[in-house]
């Protein structure tokens, strides 16, 4: 199977995004005489020396240690992605019932104190929150926090990223499900393709490597673009992550629309039989591969066909302050209510520990999940 060429529009965007310095070197490489950008994801030296013992409150009954916290900053979004929310939108929580900035930081401090070393900010679209840069800057002050990441649709990324990097943002995931501008508008029900591409290239320009690109693959919609996405990794430091289509409230999930990891991998191997499997961390959600000689890599998030529940280390806090111990579970506990009732740190930890302790061994399976009541993805934190 021959790879289809990336559209001319995309090629123009790619060329425009890789500007040169005075020496003619692309901005993704250091220019002669200029300092190398140091990406902030590298652990600070003192962390290993002063790391506290891992908290029993964040360890579940199966021995899984939850060191990764995802915090949703808002339920609002400037796109309307088909797999994330219903076309008519979703009822939004009143502002008074959403976590305040101070409540977000209070919870973050508590979780980091107990052993969380990675926080990812999500939404909604986190970059529409006015104080997102300040939140990142304050999170950076937490001793023991190694990584501050963000998952964004990319619309506001190019404009805000210089400030975010200065504040301490160390990892970026950008959602992009097609390389065809017209199809982009169909999937997200809004314009903005070129802004997303500009954001990706701004991240490369500022030294982020890899820049993760999340692509939800849906049969009949974008599975024909797999090879085009992989082709981007030849010259760019991207980690293109193909995500199996997952069921959430309002996204009209259908098994026939889901393209499995193995089917996607077979498609890639027909074009690039030399595709190599890369080693992965124990708690990784992604199966990573690389084509020899390519600058970037590709990964697969196999939540449906080959779940990774046994090594899950993730917890989620929704924008309205609920703790979710499983993305696909409908069990939640309100940390907001306990905070506002004046709960002490010890009382909060008991609530958190009880919720983590109830976490199940694995999710219910894609067919059962599709029948369960759960939030739309927009209200969980993508």
Image (cartoon, rainbow, N blue to C red):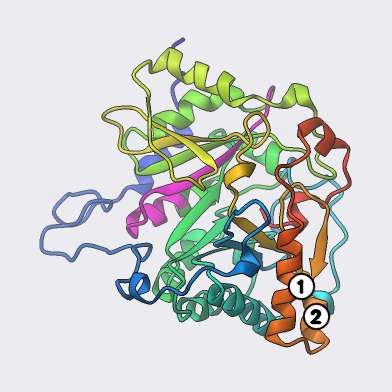
Q: Position of residue 327 (x, y in %)?
A: 71, 50
Indicate whether 176 appears above or below 300. Answer: below
User: Where is 367 relative to 348, above or below?
Assistant: above
Q: Nearer the viewer, residue 275 or 124?
A: 275
Q: Nearer the viewer, residue 136 or 307?
A: 307
Rounded to the nearest angstrom, the CA distance separating label 2 from label 1 is 9 Å
Q: Pick whichever, 134 or 6, lies toward us.
A: 134
> In this figure, which residue is indicated by the disc labeled 2?
338
Say which mark, if any, is on residue 351: 1
Q: Looking at the image, which is closer to me, 144 or 211?
A: 144
List x then y, in percent, for residue 3. Answer: 44, 17
Q: Left or right: where does residue 70 sit relative to residue 93?
A: left
Give the residue displayed 84% in from the left and 49% down from the top: 374
Q: Quadrant of residue 63?
A: bottom right
Residue 189 seen in this snapshot: yes
Say which residue appears at 24% left-offset and 49% top-offset.
26
> Is 203 part of what is drawn in magenta?
yes
Residue located 76% across and 21% down the image: 256
Q: Residues within 10 Å of mark 1 (few under 14, many from 20)?
A: some
Identify the image quadrant of residue 161. Answer: bottom left
User: Marks 2 and 1: which is nearer the front?
Assistant: 1
- Residue 76 visible within the image: no
Badge count: 2
Secondary structure, mark 2, is: helix
Label 2 close to label 1 by CB (< 8 Å): yes
The answer to whether residue 139 is left or right of residue 258 is left
Q: Is residue 159 magenta?
A: no
Find residue 133 and report its horizontal and vertical position in percent: 52, 75
Q: Magenta part of the protein: which range?
A: 200-219
Tell me where residue 362 sits by quadrant: top right
């Amino acid at each position: 199977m021959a790879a289809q060429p990336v559209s001319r529009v995309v090629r123009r965007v790619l060329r425009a995004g890789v500007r040169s310095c005075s020496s003619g070197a692309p901005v993704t490489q250091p220019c002669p005489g200029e300092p190398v950008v140091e990406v902030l994801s590298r652990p600070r030296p003192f962390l290993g020396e002063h790391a506290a013992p891992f908290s029993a409150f964040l360890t579940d009954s199966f021995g899984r240690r939850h060191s990764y916290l995802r915090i949703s900053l808002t339920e609002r979004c400037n796109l309307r992605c088909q797999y994330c929310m219903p076309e008519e939108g979703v009822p939004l929580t009143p502002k008074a019932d959403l976590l305040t900035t101070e409540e977000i930081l209070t919870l973050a401090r508590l979780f980091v104190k107990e052993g969380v070393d990675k926080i990812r900010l999500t939404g909604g679209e986190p970059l529409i929150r006015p104080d997102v840069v300040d939140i990142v800057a304050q999170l950076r002050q937490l001793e023991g926090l190694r990584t501050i990441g963000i998952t964004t649709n990319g619309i506001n990324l190019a404009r805000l990223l210089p400030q975010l990097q200065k504040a301490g943002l160390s990892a970026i995931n950008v959602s992009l499900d097609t390389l065809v501008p017209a199809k982009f508008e169909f999937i997200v029900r809004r314009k903005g393709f070129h802004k997303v591409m500009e954001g990706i290239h701004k991240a490369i320009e500022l030294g982020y490597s890899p820049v993760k690109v999340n692509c939800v693959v849906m049969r009949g919609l974008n599975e024909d673009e797999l090879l085009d996405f992989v082709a981007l990794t030849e010259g760019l430091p991207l980690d293109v992550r193909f995500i199996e289509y997952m069921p959430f409230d309002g996204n009209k999930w259908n098994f026939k629309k889901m393209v499995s990891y193995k089917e996607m991998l077979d498609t890639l191997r027909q074009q690039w039989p030399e595709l190599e499997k890369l080693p992965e961390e124990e708690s990784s959600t992604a199966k990573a591969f690389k084509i020899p000689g390519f600058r970037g890599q590709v990964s697969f998030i196999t939540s449906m066909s080959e779940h990774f529940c046994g090594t899950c280390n993730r917890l989620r806090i929704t924008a309205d302050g609920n703790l979710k111990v499983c993305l696909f579970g409908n069990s939640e506990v309100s940390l907001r209510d306990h905070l506002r009732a004046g709960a002490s740190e010890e009382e909060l930890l008991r609530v958190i520990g009880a919720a983590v302790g109830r976490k199940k061994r694995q999710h219910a399976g894609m067919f059962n999940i599709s029948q369960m009541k759960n939030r739309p993805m927009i209200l969980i934190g993508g």
